[in-house]
Image (spheres, rainbow, N blue to C red):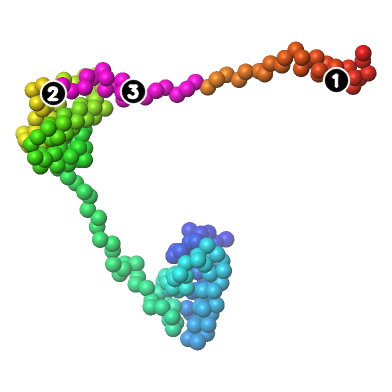
Amino acid sequence: MEYNTTRGEMKISEYGRNIQNMILYIASLPDREQRNKLTATLVNILAIMNPDMRDQVDIKHKLYDHVHLMSNFTLDIDSPYPVPPRPEEAPRPARVPYTQENIKLRPYGKYMQRMIEKAVQYPDGEEKDELVKTLANNLKKMYLNWNRDSVNDELIHEHLSLLSGTKLKLRDDDRLHSTTDILKANKQLPDKQKQPFKRRKFSGKKNDNNNNGRQKKYGKS
């Protein structure tokens, strides 16, 4: 008995071992014209076996590449497409670098840091003062997402100064939202409890009609 562990490696297991054996047989034929004819026939069969690939524009090109791969690049034919490179020779995709940024305070994230850096460029005036106050309230709100116990406004002032490079600060009369109000606003409402199934109550009139119907049906008066 022959076990799969003793058989050769399958290059593309989705096609099955029989298809791979057929390709190896075609590659072993001495007649080049016969190899070309049988390979073209096999490619058409593979296209029929995989109807989900019919809509692809380069279906034949892909199938010829798969045939060369399953033959371990030993199939010498007049292919209508260039022979694909071996996997070890194929160019590797460029490495995608991670977008590591210097985030000063990670609980606030990079976008809040960018908004504060943008606010620094605003001209001085009432609009900038209101923007700084809004940013500070958002800092406090975001801080409470990490630490839900409490936070004092002095700490938010320090973080605002750190993120802005000491270029932004609140006015003396500015007051941030209270911790209680922020926590109430952030608190999610509990899911509505499912109403228990209530048995439908029939009126007495309807019951009388049903009873009368039963009496007529069974001949009772």
What's the distance in space between the residues labelled 1 and 2, CA to CA? 78 Å
- Label 1's element? helix
| Label 2 Cα neighbours within 10 Å, binned few <14 / some 14-19 / many ≥20 | few
Which residue sits at x=13%, y=35%? 128
- Of the image marks 3 and 2, the number of the one nearer the N terminus: 2
- Label 3's element? loop
In the displayed structure, 15 sits above or below 184; it is below
Q: Is residue 186 magenta?
A: yes
Dot 2 corresponds to which residue?
174
Q: Position of residue 17 (x, y in %)?
A: 52, 65
Identify the amino acid type marked 3: Lys
Which of pointers 3 and 2 indicates the residue nearer the eye?
Answer: 2
Q: Is residue 30 left or right of residue 158?
A: right
Dot 3 corresponds to which residue?
187
Q: Is residue 69 left or right of residue 20?
A: left
Which residue sits at x=50%, y=82%? 35
| Label 3 Cα neighbours within 10 Å, binned few <14 / some 14-19 / many ≥20 | few
Which residue sits at x=75%, y=12%? 204
Q: Position of residue 55 (x, y in %)?
A: 50, 66
- Label 2's element? loop
Q: Quadrant of the N terminus?
A: bottom right
In the displayed structure, 214 sits above or below 23; it is above
Q: Position of residue 113 (x, y in %)?
A: 17, 38
* Mark identifier at residue 213: 1
Assess whether mark 2 and mark 3 are in contact (beta carbons under 8 angstroms). no
Toward the viewer: 30 or 117?
117
Assess whether mark 1 and mark 3 are in contact (beta carbons under 8 angstroms). no
Which residue sits at x=47%, y=22%? 192
